C-alpha cells in the first residue's frame, strides 16, 4: 500500500453484494453487548472525525483565498479542536498565525437559560489553563504562537480588551465559538465584530445542541441576534457533524440565504 493510500484510506468499508455496493455495518451479534460507554465512544469518534474534516477544508479555503489572520477559540475544553487548528495551520505553512484560547479554564458558568443537556452545569467541561498548555506543549506545534485569555467572557471580553485587540491584533481568519450557552455567546459575538474581515470563517460548534435544535435559544439565537446588528453579512458554509455549522463573512449587498 502506498503512503498516500495509508493517509487517505476511507474508514467506511464497502462490500459487493448481489453486484451492488453495500456499506459494511455492525451486525446484531456484534452489538449484542453494546452499552452506554460504547455509545459515547462511538459518538465522540464520529464527532471528532467530522471536526477534523472541517478544519482541513476550512484551512484549505482560507489559504487558497489568501485570508490572512489569526485563530480564536472560545471554549477550549480538552484542547482537541485547538490541536486540529495548530496541525492544519502547520500543514499550510501559516507560520505567522497566532492562536488565542479564550476560556474560563474553570468550567461553565451557572447557566441562566434552561438547556436540554443535563451535564451543562456550573463547573462542567473543566480543563485548567495549566493542563491546556501542557497538552499544547505535548502537541508541539506553534507553541510560541499560543496565547490564553482566562476568565468568563462577561468579564474578560470588555471594552478595554476589545480596543486593545482592534488596535494591536490581526484580523481573524478562523474562529471557533464553542461556548455552549446563549448568555456566554453574546459577549463573544460582540467582541469579534471589529476583528472580522471578508472571508473569515466562523464555526459554531453547538448550533443545534442544548436546546433541542430551537434557533430561538442557545448559541444559535445569539448568532441570529448578532446578524441583526453586525455590519457584516454571513453566508452558510460547511455543516460539522450532527450539531455544528459554519459561515463565511462577506461585505456588500446582503444575499438572502437561510440562516
Image (cartoon, grey):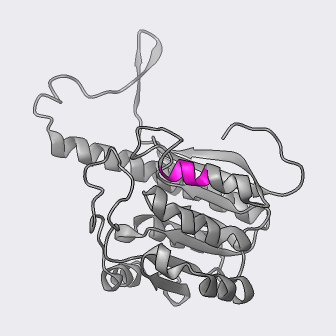
| Residue 219 part of the magenta segment | yes
Q: Which residues are magenta?
A: 218-223
| Residue 68 part of the magenta segment | no
**Does residue 25 appear left or right of residue 16 in this picture?**
left
Q: Main secondary structure of the magenta part?
A: helix
**Dividing the picture into quarters, in which one does residue 186 lie?**
bottom right
**Does residue 156 appear left or right of residue 224 in this picture?**
left
* Residue farthest to the left, as pictured: 33
**Image coords of residue 96 (percent x, y):** 67, 84
The quadrant of the rendering that contains the C terminus is top right
Taking 57 as reference, is 155 above or below it?
A: below
Rendered residue at 68%/85% (across/down): 163
- Is residue 2 visible in the rendered image? The answer is no
Rendered residue at 33%/44% (across/down): 116
**Does residue 214 appear left or right of residue 236 in this picture?**
left
**Image coords of residue 72 (percent x, y):** 57, 72
**Image coords of residue 99 (percent x, y):** 56, 79
**Image coords of residue 103 (percent x, y):** 43, 75
**Dividing the picture into quarters, in which one does residue 199 lie?**
bottom right
Taking 34 as reference, is 184 above or below it?
A: below
- Is residue 250 visible in the rendered image? The answer is yes
- Closer to the camera, 71 or 15? 71
Amino acid at each position: 500500500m502506498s503512503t498516500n493510500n495509508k493517509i487517505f484510506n476511507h474508514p467506511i468499508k464497502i462490500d459487493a453484494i448481489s453486484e451492488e455496493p453495500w456499506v459494511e455495518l455492525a451486525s446484531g451479534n456484534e452489538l449484542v453487548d453494546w452499552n452506554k460507554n460504547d455509545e459515547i465512544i462511538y459518538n465522540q469518534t464520529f464527532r471528532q472525525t467530522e471536526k477534523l474534516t472541517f478544519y482541513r477544508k476550512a484551512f484549505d479555503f482560507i489559504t487558497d483565498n489568501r485570508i490572512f489572520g489569526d485563530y480564536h477559540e472560545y471554549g477550549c475544553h480538552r484542547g482537541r479542536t485547538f490541536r486540529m487548528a495548530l496541525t492544519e495551520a502547520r500543514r499550510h505553512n501559516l507560520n505567522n498565525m497566532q492562536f488565542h484560547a479564550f476560556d474560563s479554564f474553570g468550567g461553565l458558568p451557572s447557566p441562566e437559560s434552561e438547556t436540554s443537556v443535563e451535564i451543562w452545569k456550573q463547573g462542567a467541561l473543566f480543563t485548567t489553563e495549566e493542563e491546556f498548555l501542557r497538552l499544547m506543549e505535548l502537541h508541539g506545534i506553534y507553541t510560541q504562537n499560543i496565547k490564553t485569555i482566562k476568565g468568563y467572557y462577561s468579564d474578560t471580553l470588555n471594552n478595554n480588551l476589545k480596543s486593545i485587540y482592534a488596535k494591536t491584533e490581526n484580523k481573524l481568519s478562523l474562529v471557533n465559538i464553542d461556548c455552549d450557552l446563549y448568555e456566554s455567546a453574546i459577549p463573544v459575538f460582540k467582541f469579534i465584530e471589529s476583528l472580522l474581515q471578508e472571508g473569515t470563517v466562523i464555526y459554531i460548534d453547538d448550533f443545534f445542541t442544548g436546546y433541542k435544535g430551537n434557533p430561538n435559544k442557545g448559541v444559535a439565537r445569539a448568532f441570529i441576534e448578532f446578524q441583526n446588528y453586525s455590519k457584516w453579512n454571513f453566508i452558510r458554509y460547511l455543516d460539522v457533524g450532527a450539531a455544528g455549522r459554519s459561515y463565511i463573512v462577506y461585505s456588500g449587498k446582503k444575499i438572502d440565504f437561510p440562516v
